[in-house]
Amino acid sequence: MSGVLKALLKREKQLHHFTELIDRFLHNFDEERDSRQLNEELKEVAGKDPTVKEEAVQAREDSNFQVMHQFYDRFCNLKAELIELQAGTAHLLSGSDNHQAAGPVSRVKLPDIRLPSFSGKIREWVTVRDTFRSLIDNNNQLTDVDKFTYLRSSLSGDALQEVSSLELSADNYSVAWKALVRRYENKKLIMKAHLDALFSLETLKKESYDGINQLIGEFDKNLQMLEKIGENTAGWSTLLAYMLCSRLDSATLHLWETHHGSTEVPPYDKVIEFLRNHCSVLQSISTSRPSVPDHRPTKTSFCHTTARLPGRCPFCSESWHTAFHCMKFQRMKVPERSEAVNKNMLCRNCLSSGHYARSCDKGVCHHCRQKHHSMLRINQHCLMSKEFSTKLKFDELSSFLAVQGIGSARSLSTKSVQAEVSPRLSDISHFAEQMQFHVLPKLTIALPTANIDPHQWILPESTLMADPQFHKTGPVDVIIGAEYYMDLLKEGQLKATSEGPTLQNTVFGWIVSGRVPNTSSCRLSSVTHACSTADIQDQLTRFWELETCRTRSTHSLEKSACEDHFEKTTVRDSKGRFVVTLPKKECVINQLGESKEIAVRRFAGLEKRFAANPQLKQLYTEFISEYQNLGHMVEVVNETSSGIEYYLPHHAVLKPDSTTTKLRVVFDASCKTSTGVSLNDALMVGPVVQDDLLDHSTISIASVRDSGRRRKDVSHGECYSR
């Protein structure tokens, strides 16, 4: 280890030790005892150089810059706390020096005024700006270094990133403050943010003091901020009254209409005055109403939830707005959107909370008619023509994609390429994005279908077109997927003529879309038709290959044994019916005990139901007769048997409202015998062969025993189910 590195490490260790001492001093600070020592500590801090940490990290070559930034932020926060304490104890020091002349000094400590934290949310900028200017920027007792320290300690998120590259120095304070003002001092965006907050307020569900009071507070706060930035809201009375009334619950709205009692449009001030008085009434009722103790037993429940602030967008945490209006959600790629929806436990169909897609009644995707939101539609791929890929000599990779277009026309892509997409000139924008393109033989016909004369259009001279030859017919080489759409648009839109088309500004330059006025006497039309020419025999062959069960098994040993048992023992009788034997566990089947007693006891209970309900008895008799006539069971002639016997209890389920089967008989193969083993316990569990259906993993072909006859399933072999 070199001598320079040893010296750096020693200074780094001393700096860490000093930081711990300052932290301990602040933690144990007593105003009366430590006020004079505070100035000495500040002098010590001012003499320390926190960049020693950065030099030590670079010298060690460990690249742990996160630790370095964390230490730097901690050092700045400690210094800011010392400066705050100094400002708060200045009256004690001056009072102590002039005690004899000035008389007694108050020892009451005023509460600290903490700077509001600013993370970059545009709605908070005006409040943060005015507070910081009043407490810090206009304070002549603070140096620019101290002001910069305060500024950094009050920033977080995007706002902190704006000034994080500037070193802590007196000269950089003004640079940092101007950078924040330049980015966030945007009257249009500030006004839009407060208007969005007003328009996104939710309608109250029921009459309550808290709900109405919060609604009034939101209107007052946002209107005051709009007036503060110079917006004249005096002429908005009618609009504000309508917005406020439309967000009231039905009970409060009924009271207001009764109170107003006029056909004239009410002014906003009158609505607010009524709601304030109504709030006072609700508050008086809630405080005077005695609380009734709840003697019901408490229930403990557990659930997994995702914390989300009420009235906030789940994606950007701003005031509530729909996903269509959330810029952060729109900038996400489709997989990122899906992950954000799952993380916030939202419905994938309507992007709301409180339910899931399977129970959502808000419609389906308007693209594919599936039950998911159109913004979560995954198949929004980028496409490229084969000719264009060959011309640019892209490396093509194997990739399968079936593309379905208008009229269910299908195309198949077996290759894909990776390409960086950027504008034709760097003067247009610095956009550059790596995209995956699926290669198709042809994308579409040449567009436009005929040359267009744009000389009559109104185009600004400074307009840079994405395609300077847009008015000439030419091939379409690439199609960029919709998942990139919002990233490509920029502010700016104008009409070329009163009848169209529309020019839209993008990262590639201006593009043209819409209707073009017809200046020619001839009409051009084109039709693109695509169809599948696959041979019907090939399609049938592929269908049966997919449907066959003879694929390599990936099941467990028990499921594989059950599958083998089915293939070896299943036969068809003379009538064409399948005869299936039960897949028994040989080591368990012999453990079946006595089961007749419980089966007879349950049947006795069933007979009592027959006595009370003749209709039930008639339907049951018809069912048993049909069961026997179909050959599903046979009568046991010889009661003694050397094989294994299992008596199946059963009961009748009556559904008078059913249009098909009003009665069905349920056989209980899970009923335990005297040994604690049931028939289901002695049967192997087979694999699930159909998805999204009920799992009938245990198939019980059961027979019953009524008042004088015993019946046996012929397909059970040596296991007699009675």
Image: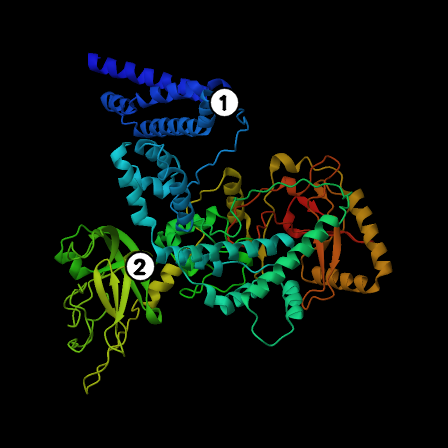
The quadrant of the image that shows the N terminus is top left
Which of these two is toward me, 64 or 6? Answer: 6
Q: Position of residue 206 (x, y in %)?
A: 64, 58
The correct choice, above or below, for 292 with respect to 486 in the image is above
Mark 2–mark 1 distance (CA, rounded to whole Å) = 59 Å
Please tell me whether mark 2 or mark 1 is closer to you in this view: 1
Q: What element does badge 2 sit on? A: helix
Q: Which residue is situated farthest in the front direction here?
A: 101
Crowding at mark 2 (Cα within 10 Å: few <14, some 14-19, many 20+): few
- 615 left or right of 183? right
Which of these two is toward me, 377 or 643? Answer: 377
Q: Position of residue 266 (x, y in %)?
A: 57, 70
Q: Which residue is mark 2?
A: 485
Amino acid bearing label 2:
Tyr
Between disc 2 and disc 1, whose residue precedes? 1
- Residue 315, visible in the rendered structure: yes
The correct choice, above or below, for 585 with respect to 44 in the image is below
Amino acid bearing label 1:
Glu
Which of these two is toward me, 212 or 270? Answer: 270
- 432 left or right of 653? left
- 202 left or right of 168? right
Q: Position of residue 349 (x, y in %)?
A: 48, 58
Q: What element does badge 1 sit on? A: helix
Q: Residue at x 58, y 47 (%)?
A: 697
- Residue 322, visible in the rendered structure: no
Q: Which residue is mark 1?
A: 31
